[in-house]
Every structure is written in structure tokens, then in C-alpha cells.
Image (cartoon, grey):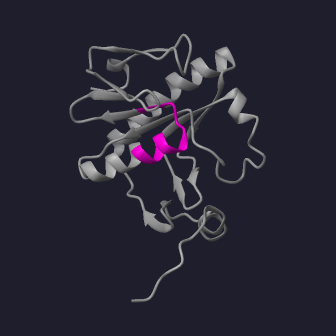
Amino acid sequence: MVATDKLTAEEFWTRYGDSETRCELLRGEVVATVSHGSYHGDIAALITSSLASHVRQHHLGRVKVEAHYRLGEHTLRVPDVSFVSAEHQALIDDPTKFVPFAPDLAIEIISPSETHTAVRDKIEDYRAAGTAMMWLVYPNSRGVDVHDLQAGRIGHFGPEDTLVLEAVLPGFRLALKQIFPD
């Protein structure tokens, strides 16, 4: 058996940073990610606009869409939507590259084709890298699982619920019926 070298985040970025191919680096291996349909894009846009408006108004940091985050020497993940606090945003030396640390909030819109194992791996990668909170958005059931990754708590919210996330986004409230278009 021949051993293969794992790519580092820097090597991946050199090869794929300007690529039109959607991909992540998972434990040193390049993994192509799938393009999603219109409904996925609608939900991502609605979450982004709600978050960005609040974050900008209160000078809390930055909301990013499909940015690469370094979660380890050999791992770059790309959440659908993310938030980086102003304190952490100030640590980014080169905004044309991947973010050199984990986001404060990672939001993944889960497609029906994603396996339980793949979702669990995402959660663990973000938790291990220091992400405070993660949302798993389930378009088919119109629900959101909110993972407080550092405390190990999970909350489930349905389409009639409102998310209140004081720990990561002070003052932010989001009625889930606003992000699930009819």
C-alpha cells in the first residue's frame, strides 16, 4: 500500500483557492461539494440578509457566505452562512485567502442527500476548532437545530419558533417563518 500525502490548508488554497470548483479540504483530502437548488439559495439569502442587517447595525462583526475556514492543519470547511465577531475579524491578515480560524457561528443548510455521518463530522470539526454555535437548517421539515458546541447543548426550533441567540449575537431574533419561503 502506498501512503499519500495529505494537503495542508495552504497547499489546498494554492491549488484551489481561485478555482470555480466548489470544494472543501477534509483531513487532507479534497472533497467536491454539490451545488444546491433554488430553495436552498432562497433560505441562505434570507438568513444572510437577516443576520447581516443586525450585525451591521450593531457593529458586531461580519456575516460571510460560503467562506473557507481553517478548522485544522488539513481541514477547510465552507459553511453556507457564517458569522465572525468584530474581535475575530480583526485577526484576519489577508481577506483574499481562507479565514485562518473557525467562525463564531456556522450555518449549514442540510440537503436530503447528506448522510447522518457527514452532518456529524461537520459538527465535530466545528466544535473541535472552537466554533461557539452551529445551526443545522432542515428545509424539508422547516426546522433548525441550534448546537451550542462548547456547552454541548442542542435546541430544536420549528417553523413557528423564534431564535434568540444572545450569547453569540446580542439582540438578534429571527422568526423562522421568515426564512422558509412558501
Q: Residue 156, percent across and down?
A: 28, 23
Between 124 and 122, the one lying in front of the other is 124
Q: Quadrant of the C terminus?
A: top left
47 relative to 128, above or below: above
82 relative to 96, above or below: above
Q: Residue 120, percent across and down?
A: 33, 46
Q: Is residue 125 magenta?
A: yes
Identify which residue is drawn at 54% across, 22% down.
168
Q: Does the magenta stretch include residue 146?
A: no
Side of 163 where 170 appears, left or right: right
Q: How many labels does the image show?
A: 0
Q: Hey, which quadrant is residue 5 in on the image?
A: bottom right
Identify which residue is drawn at 69% across, 34% down.
88
Identify which residue is drawn at 59% across, 59% down.
73
Q: Residue 99, percent across and down?
A: 65, 47
Give the residue at the far bottom of this rendering.
Answer: 1
Q: Hey, which quadrant is residue 176 in on the image?
A: top left
Q: Quadrant of the N terminus?
A: bottom left
Side of 87 where 23 appears, left or right: left
Residue 114 visible, this angle: no
Residue 163 visible, this angle: yes
The magenta span reads 124-134
Between 55 and 75, the one lying in front of the other is 75
Give the residue at the far top of this rendering.
Answer: 171
Give the residue at the far left of this rendering.
Answer: 141
Q: Residue 115, percent across and down?
A: 25, 52
Side of 47 where 170 appears, left or right: right
